[in-house]
Image: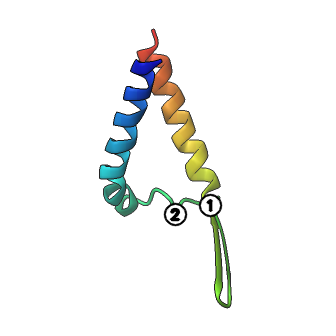
Amino acid sequence: MARTLIVLGVILVVAGLLWPLLGRLGLGHLPGDIVVRREGFVFYFPLTTMVLVSAVASLLFWLFGR
């Protein structure tokens, strides 16, 4: 369990450090991401981005779990 938490922590730190780079690549503004803009209100739900990140994470866990 401790090893899993350490790995998840390292992944979160790396993702945090790479976040500005990922933003410039368009991650978070993909077709299918839901944005509702009203006067004084913005609702953002990155649906496509979450699906893509989940698929990549699942692939990585599957590859490293072998």
Mark 1 is on which residue type?
Asp
Left or right of 41? Residue 66 is left
Q: In the image, what residue occupies the spot 40% across and 42% down?
A: 12
Query: What is the image's colouring?
Result: rainbow
Residue 14 in the image: x percent, y percent? 32, 42
User: Few, some or many C-alpha atoms within 10 Å of disc 2 (few <14, some 14-19, many ≥20)?
Assistant: some
Q: Residue furthest top?
A: 66
Q: Is residue 5 or residue 16 the one in the foreground?
A: 5
Above or below for 9 versus 27: above
Mark 2 is on which residue type?
His
Q: Is residue 66 or residue 1 the one in the foreground?
A: 1
Residue 24 in the image: x percent, y percent? 35, 63
Left or right of 22? Residue 31 is right
Element type at marker 1? loop
Q: Is residue 17 or residue 48 the one in the foreground?
A: 17
Q: Which residue is mark 1?
A: 33
Q: Residue furthest front?
A: 2
Quarter of the figure with residue 8: top left
Residue 7 in the image: x percent, y percent? 38, 27
Q: Quadrant of the C terminus?
A: top left
Q: Are marks 2 and 1 in contact (CB under 8 Å)?
A: yes
Q: In the image, what residue occupies the spot 52% across and 42% down?
A: 53
Above or below for 31 versus 54: below
User: Few, some or many C-alpha atoms within 10 Å of disc 1 (few <14, some 14-19, many ≥20)?
Assistant: some
**What is the distance, in whole Å, between disc 2 and disc 1 at their CAs?**
6 Å
Q: In the image, what residue occupies the spot 46% across and 56% down?
A: 27
Q: Which residue is mark 2?
A: 29
Above or below for 40 versus 4: below
